[in-house]
Amino acid sequence: RRGLLESAERLGIATKISDSDDPRATKRKRNEAGSDGGAVLAAMLDFARTHGADAASEARERELILRVIALDAAELKAVIAGLREAPDIGPAMRAGMISFAIEMVAEDRPAAAVALYQDSADLLGKDGAGADALGISLGNWAKINPAAAADWIRQHPEIADDGAKLAALAGAAESDPAAAMRLLDALQIADPSDAAEPLAEAAKSPEQRTALLAALRARVAAHPENADFLSETLEAMGRNLTGEDFPQTTGWISAARLTPEESAAFAGGLSYFTTKAETGAWIGWMAGNLPADAAAEGAGELIGQWTQEDYVAAGKWLAAAPENAVKSAAVAAYAATVADTDPTTAALWADTLPEGALRTETQVTIWENWPKADAAGRAAFGAKIGIGKDR
């Protein structure tokens, strides 16, 4: 639904239209590209009717993107009106092209983009391309004027659903987390916990995470009942962690002075798909920085995911890891994960666990997941740990 915009990004074409551009230069660009509204509308309709998945269509897409970017808001409004009235393009293509045009304006003139969306809300609706266009427009508007974006949302409840509210909240959080906290109350989102993910996604750098954390802590200080919301947002921060290595992230945790409970919430969002080659380092960090239960749970989750993706590397790390409660939890998770493919190895790992409930539970899990094709092996293992075949 955002094929044109995605193509622009793929081809390295800037999609922002700056209000500060020299009007004469902008007009010259339009004249050079043949980008008056009528010509662009004709080109968009021709593309909608005849485009394919070939190199020629991609070249046409590139040219069309450049021409749309060169339009001013008034010309785009005329183009959108023409797209609405065109009788021979399908509804999905119509909505996609109108949404693309709106997103072009939204980059630098978000209030105007919201107005364009409002004119076509009956056609675009609240799903798919329409939701994208409104969300991007409101998010960009809230970055620069959260109060104005919130006022528009309150005045248009028939258009602005919770998805639109969350987009505005995320936009505000990117530039002013304290303003985002005020919006959280003003917008009356049905389930405030839904805001945790977009808030965390907006905190793209350590500095932004620190600012958001300060706003969340201030909110909890004033409203202690929001403690769970702080934890949910920290977990979402961990889940959205990208582009930073282990030293950078743990350095941020230290600099931000996360409490053990806050650290546990953040670590709860980590997964092997973000920790990758540093998974072992993260498990070691958990052992030294989290409450015992949280460290064991987090280590078990990470080692389980790691084992599914690369059981050899996970096993090598386990073999060298220091003996402690966190390693025991990791061993249990590793054994449970490999039980259905390599039950003999799983059983050997279970034997390394200290006597007690965890070892017993792990052995039972291995027996339950033992491949049915190896009935003799399963029976022998069951006899070893005192489980009958009818259990």
Image (cartoon, rainbow, N blue to C red):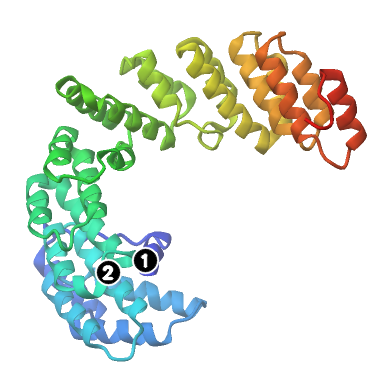
1 and 2 marks in contact (CB < 8 Å): yes
Task: Give percent across and percent down for residue 70.
Answer: 22, 70
Above or below — where is 353 with respect to 32?
Answer: above
Q: Amino acid at mark 1?
A: Arg
Q: Nearest the camera: 289 or 336?
A: 336
- Of labels 1 and 2, earlier in sequence is 1
Quarter occupied by the N terminus: bottom left
Residue 2's mark? 1
| Residue count near mark 1 (Cα–Cα under 10 Å), binned few <14, some 14–19, many ≥20 | some
Secondary structure under the numbered disc 1 in the rendered image: loop
Taking the spot 30% from the left edge, 36% from the top edge, the residue there is 203
Above or below — where is 332 with respect to 27?
Answer: above
How many numbered callouts? Answer: 2
Q: Residue furthest right?
A: 376
Residue 146's mark? none
Task: Give percent across and percent down for residue 36.
Answer: 18, 81
In the rendered image, which residue does mark 2 sit on? 99
Q: Residue furthest front?
A: 390
Task: Give percent across and percent down for residue 165.
Answer: 20, 50
